[in-house]
Image (spheres, rainbow, N blue to C red):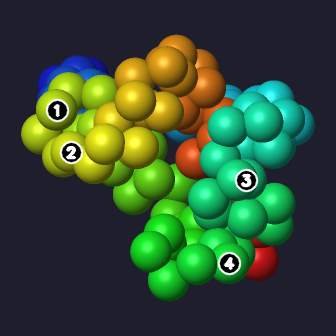
Amino acid sequence: MKKMIAGASVAALLGLSLPGHAADIAAGAEKARTVCAACHGADGISKSPLWPNLRGQKEQYIAKQLKAFQADTRTDPLMTAQAKALSEADVANVAAYFASLK
């Protein structure tokens, strides 16, 4: 029990989702289409060297970066504004969507 509590605490601090809290990949795909695609490409492959490819990135990595933009611990004029407009569910869903693309 102590290990579960410790694991949940660490996950919460890192902004990671725990197993059992499944993200909605379909909702992530829709949000990515309307919010992310202009810069990161409809398929997660950016058309510009200015923006990273998101296709196949690790889910936790994407979520961590979005949360860093939301918390102003990572900044970029475009990304900070985009990330701050995302709900917690949006972050989880978008991260799951891009991670699902191989």
- What distance separates the C-alpha of mark 4 from that of mark 2? 22 Å
Sooner in the amino-acid sequence: mark 1 or mark 4: 4
- Classify residue 66 as left or right of residue 48: left
- What distance separates the C-alpha of mark 1 from that of mark 3? 22 Å
Mark 3 highlights which residue? 37
| Identity, as a three-letter code, of the amino acid under mark 3 | Ala
- Write the residue at 12% across / 39% down: 73
- Write the residue at 64% across / 73% down: 46
Query: Which mark is drawn over residue 40?
Result: none
| Identity, as a three-letter code, of the amino acid under mark 4 | Lys
Q: Position of residue 98 (x, y in %)?
A: 67, 58
Sooner in the amino-acid sequence: mark 4 or mark 2: 4
Q: Secondary structure at mark 2?
A: loop
| Identity, as a three-letter code, of the amino acid under mark 1 | Asp
Query: Is the residue under label 4 in contact with that under label 1 (CB below 8 Å)?
Result: no
Q: Position of residue 75 (x, y in %)?
A: 21, 45
- What distance separates the C-alpha of mark 3 from that of mark 2? 20 Å
Mark 2 highlights which residue? 75
Query: Which mark is drawn over residue 72?
Result: 1
Reply above or below: 31 against 97.
above
Can residue 55 be seen here? no
Q: Secondary structure at mark 1?
A: loop
Can residue 23 be seen here? yes
- Write the residue at 76% across / 77% down: 102
Reply above or below: 11 against 21.
below
Mark 4 highlights which residue? 47
Q: Secondary structure at mark 4?
A: loop
- In this view, the residue in front, 52 or 1, is 52
Reply above or below: 101 against 33.
below
